[in-house]
Image: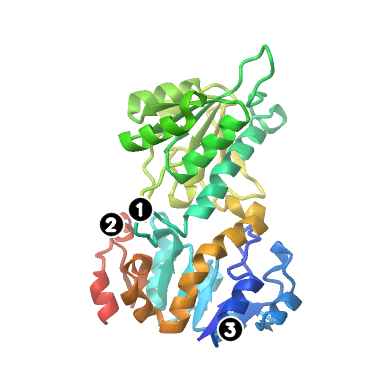
């Protein structure tokens, strides 16, 4: 199979779909690997490093899309990239389709086979291809929130950990999954006063046992969310409904009760965001203010720490990429129901039910997509 990786073109996206080491693994299995020149610059991987791994460097993204059987990326294909897709070409990347009807329509029209990292599952019911980026984003959310809290950046001028004689900042983390756990770890480590909200008693018990007295846990309902938001200096939205749009848990009315200069970091923005006032921002212009509250809603946070993120991502995406390249997409998905859960669009139809429900499509049953 010919596997191609273009240079990412989303704003300040420095990650790359394949590292030189991953390219070497594919080449060792007899596959051809095409890398757009400069694709690895953001992780300090030169064209020469890819050539040493056995990959071929091509001059443009157009060359990659025209020649590759499978495109391996990081972020969802942008409009100019979607225009280059062709029928039955495999796209293996993050897609986050639920809040993005335009991208979904373009992928449907292309006839491509679109496998989304964020909906691939594992035997434990987890999302293993999303997990490393959730870990990165969770940890970065506290860094981003701490910076936004600085007065020069529009925040309250509060230090997360305080100092002797001055209380630490109050941090509310909405969601106790991978993002929330990692955010809480960072905030606790900095000495903040941390409360984690979740709707699962099992998750709350696990978090309580882990953090003990270092963080508080609360059941997530409207009353508790409203109270925590009003008291917090920093609120981190770490909510995920796999494949579906994130629920708007913090309303505009709740926002109006927050302290002037408080900060919200919406890590769920890839799936539409969990604050009613959220809209996607970029690393160029990461924040905006609504009702005196600073919003940080960068949709590709891990792109800022591209080297760490790329290697963490390749650790989990490469085994599936090898399987798809070795067997072809249909046989690979038939052999692995967890990888099959990643199929979002195929044959001009949406195949993931949560995506279809979010956007008003009738989902093509997975069995039919694989049997076609």
Which residue corresponds to the image point at 41% horizontal and 83% vertical from the top-left? 327
N-terminal of the two: label 2 or label 3?
Answer: 3
Using residue 49 as the reference point, say whether residue 136 is left or right of it.
left
Q: Residues under labels 1 and 2: Cα distance?
A: 8 Å
Using residue 353 as the reference point, say whether residue 192 is left or right of it.
right
**Mark 3 falls on what kind of element?**
helix
User: Residue 134, percent across and down?
Assistant: 51, 50
Tell me the quarter of the image containing the C terminus.
Answer: bottom left
User: Residue 28, percent across and down?
Assistant: 58, 83
Which residue corresponds to the image point at 36% horizontal and 42% vertical from the top-left? 247
Q: Which mark is residue 28?
A: 3
N-terminal of the two: label 1 or label 3?
Answer: 3
Quickly name the residue at label 2.
Answer: 357
Which quadrant of the structure image shows residue 74? bottom right
Quickly name the residue at label 1.
Answer: 244
| Total marks in image | 3
């Amino acid at each position: 199979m010919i596997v191609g990786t273009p240079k990412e073109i989303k704003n300040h996206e420095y990650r790359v779909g394949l590292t030189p080491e991953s390219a070497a693994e594919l080449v060792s299995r007899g596959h051809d690997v095409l890398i757009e020149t400069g694709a690895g610059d953001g992780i300090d991987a030169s064209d020469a490093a890819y050539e040493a791994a056995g990959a071929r460097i091509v001059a443009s993204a157009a060359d990659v899309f025209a020649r590759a059987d499978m495109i391996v990326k990081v972020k969802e294909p942008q409009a100019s990239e979607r225009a280059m897709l062709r029928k039955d070409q495999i796209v293996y990347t993050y897609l986050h389709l639920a809040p993005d009807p335009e991208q979904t329509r373009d992928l449907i029209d292309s006839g491509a086979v679109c496998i989304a990292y964020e909906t691939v599952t594992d035997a434990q019911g987890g999302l293993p291809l999303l997990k490393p980026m959730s870990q990165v984003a969770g940890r970065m959310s506290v860094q981003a929130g701490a910076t936004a809290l600085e007065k020069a950046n529009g925040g309250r001028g509060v230090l997360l950990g305080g100092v002797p004689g001055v209380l630490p900042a109050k941090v509310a983390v909405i969601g106790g999954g991978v993002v929330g756990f990692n955010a809480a770890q960072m905030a606790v480590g900095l000495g903040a006063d941390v409360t984690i909200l979740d709707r699962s008693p099992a998750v709350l018990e696990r978090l309580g046992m882990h953090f003990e007295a270092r963080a508080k846990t609360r059941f997530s309902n409207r009353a508790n969310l409203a109270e925590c938001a009003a008291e917090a200096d920093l609120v981190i939205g770490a909510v995920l409904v796999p494949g579906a749009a994130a629920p708007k848990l913090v309303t505009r009315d709740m926002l109006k009760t927050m302290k002037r200069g408080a900060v919200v970091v919406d890590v769920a923005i890839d799936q539409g965001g969990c604050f009613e006032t959220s809209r996607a921002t970029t690393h160029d212009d990461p924040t905006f203010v609504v009702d005196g509250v600073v919003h940080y809603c960068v949709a590709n946070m891990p792109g800022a720490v591209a080297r760490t993120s790329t290697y963490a991502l390749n650790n989990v995406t490469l085994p599936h990429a090898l399987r798809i390249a070795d067997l072809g997409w249909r046989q690979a998905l038939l052999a692995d129901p967890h990888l099959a859960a990643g199929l979002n669009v195929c044959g001009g139809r949406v195949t993931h039910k949560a995506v279809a429900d979010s956007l008003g499509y009738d989902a093509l049953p997975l069995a039919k997509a694989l049997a076609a």
